[in-house]
Image (cartoon, rainbow, N blue to C red):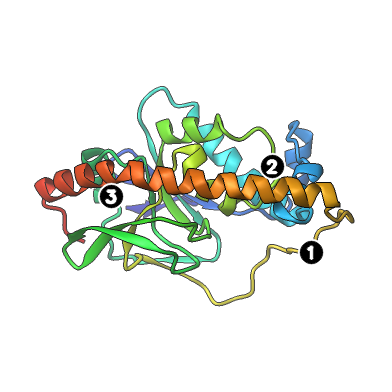
Amino acid sequence: MQWNSNLVLSSSAFPIQFVVNAYVQIWSRFQSRGGFYNNTESVRFWGRGLSKSEIGCAASHLSILTELAKSRQENWLLVIEDDVFLDPSFDYGTLVRLCKTSRIGYLRLYARHAARSRHIVWLGQRELIRFKKAPMGTQAYLISSQKARSFLETVRTISRPIDWEMDRFWANGLYNYALFPFPCLELGSSSSVNKQSEFDKRPSVYDRVVWFFWKSKEALRRLLTNIYLLRQDAVVRKTSKQGKFEF
């Protein structure tokens, strides 16, 4: 594998691209292309408006996934944010074969929190797990063009941080399978994403009531989806063992 000037890695073994996702100054480009941020929904369902850098971060991920979704063939993209260090000795190409064999269209390679998870199978010195709750973070993930299309169909506006949007697996089908220990690290520098909104609006009483019922519905949908995924976990376990993958 070789780095080229566009910060994209190409692999001779699999049609996989590595894209460094930088969101600095993307806010204006997002607006100029007709991107729509819904501050009312953000305040109601997130509790506050998003900052321009949070919107820009979301817009950059959505822009990358939109380009991937245009592919008529099955392609794979490894998206990494600009503050992530990849293990140079890790075989990233084999991840595509693992995902194809196990029918996993979205694989996390990093998470911010140790959210509740389920062990699926050991793959050498690493294990394949599935997060049952939101682990947060979009630092590094592998995604297929088909999954990118299905995810984008569920996103009409930007109304919450992109990691929360992608972690809503019960709504968007991005089931949170992950490889652990992660083959990458987040650098220790402070985040460039400002979480202080420039939009001065607070939730009303009505917003809080709507949020309470919406949150309860989300929790029920998450529970039911986790139960539904038990059968898929068994299939993933069986096919992964048959593939004899080791990482």
Q: Is residue 43 visible?
A: no
Per the image, the residue denoted by label 2 is 158
Identify the residue at image location x=47%, y=47%.
222
Per the image, the residue denoted by label 1 is 196
Mark 2 lies on a secondary structure that is loop
**Residue 6 screen position, x and y as percent:** 52, 48
Residues at marks 2 and 3, CA–CA distance in whole angstroms: 30 Å
**Residue 194 screen position, x and y as percent:** 73, 64
**Residue 190 screen position, x and y as percent:** 64, 74
Q: Is residue 50 visible?
A: yes
Mark 1: which amino acid?
Gln
Residues at marks 3 and 1, CA–CA distance in whole angstroms: 37 Å
Nearer to us in this view, 191 or 50: 50
Identify the residue at image location x=75%, y=56%.
47
Nearer to us in this view, 51 or 119: 119
**Residue 232 screen position, x and y as percent:** 27, 41
Quadrant in which residue 73 is drawn: top left
